[in-house]
Image (cartoon, rainbow, N blue to C red):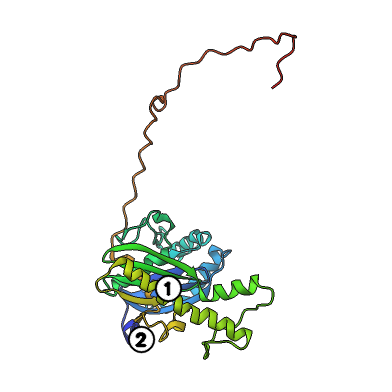
Amino acid sequence: MPEAARRTSRSRIATDYRLAVDVGNTQTVLGLFDGGRILKDWRIATRRDLTVDEIVLSLQGLVLPALATRGAAVRCALASVVPTQDAPWRAALAAVFGGADRTPPRLLSHRDCGGLRLDYELPSQIGADRLANVLGAHALGIREGVVVDFGTATTFDVFSEGSYHGGVICPGLQTGMRALARNAARLHEAELGWPAAAVGRTTDEALRIGILRGAVGMVEHLLRDILADMKMRDPVILATGGLAPWMKGRATSIRRFEPDLTLIGINELFNTPAAAPREPSPPPRPRPGAPPPNKTLPPQPQRTQKPHPHGREASR
């Protein structure tokens, strides 16, 4: 999204503040919106032991000074792929922006995903960031296609109008590099940099070629297979994630790069009604011949053990 389109002039008083929070494995990204326009964003390192008080201090130091009106109402939505941080972030957002009754933020999940139809065998396993990316694509007016997110993992998420169809999960660029350095005694982690040659003449060059040029080949091959399998009429391939710039101009199947796509998708949650609480599942049907629920079987006669012919109990 062009800078002029995604940033609002400070002279305009925001009237519909929304805070979208994306808790990722490596970084947590916060985006302050006025309606559909992003005003400002922040990136902080994700820590799995972060406390509510620490998050509150971050929100007070980063977000509150960015509000044009002191005490302005801010609606919040959270997407997290770090389960240990769900509760602290929800509590902190409620404490800072939830008002007197500490209204909790809206939580993006398979239970509340903006009305997306989930074509997935186990919807509870879908990462909230993947659902956010599809919601973001829909918010940008894209009807069908694939989102490739380059982060800790490289994910491919397939969608059509109103539906999420699943995807592919691969190691991320830096994750692959670190795995090699950790598991191969004579390899180390090389700094990412686009290799000029196709054949490395140093170990660092060889690693960069394998990670970056190898990623291009992986992306192109998987996209070709996905599009052939899904038989889409007019798919749009777009990329997001902190490492997506490495693919710009190299993975030619990707035609659109949207750095704020996940935040846009979390923000889109506010444009849809919250999912109604699910009714409890009905009790399982009893097996044939089993007693009805809450009904016990009549007492059975006790079996007595016959005495051993030699006067001793039989060994067990």
Judged from this view, the residue extending furthest toward the front is 199
Residue 190 in picture, x, y percent from top left: 61, 82
Helix, strand or loop for disc 1: strand
Residue at the (39%, 30%) spot, across then down: 287
- Location of the C terminus (image quadrant): top right
Type of amino acid under label 2: Glu
Give whichever of 33, 285 is nearer the camera: 285
Type of amino acid under label 1: Asp
How many residues crowd mark 1 within 10 Å: few (<14), some (14–19), many (20+)? many
Residue 124 in picture, x, y percent from top left: 42, 55
Q: Is residue 87 left or right of residue 115?
A: right
Residue linked to disc 2: 3
Label 2, label 1: how far apart the Cα atoms are: 20 Å
Helix, strand or loop for disc 2: helix
Mark 2 / mark 1, whichever is N-terminal: 2
Residue at the (41%, 82%) spot, across then down: 251
How many residues crowd mark 2 within 10 Å: few (<14), some (14–19), many (20+)? few
Which label belongs to residue 149?
1
Q: Is residue 181 left or right of residue 53?
A: right
Judged from this view, the residue extending furthest toward the left is 233
Q: Is residue 238 left or right of residue 23?
A: left
Residue 56 in picture, x, y percent from top left: 51, 67
Report which quarter residue 11 is drawn in.
bottom left
Which label belongs to residue 271?
none
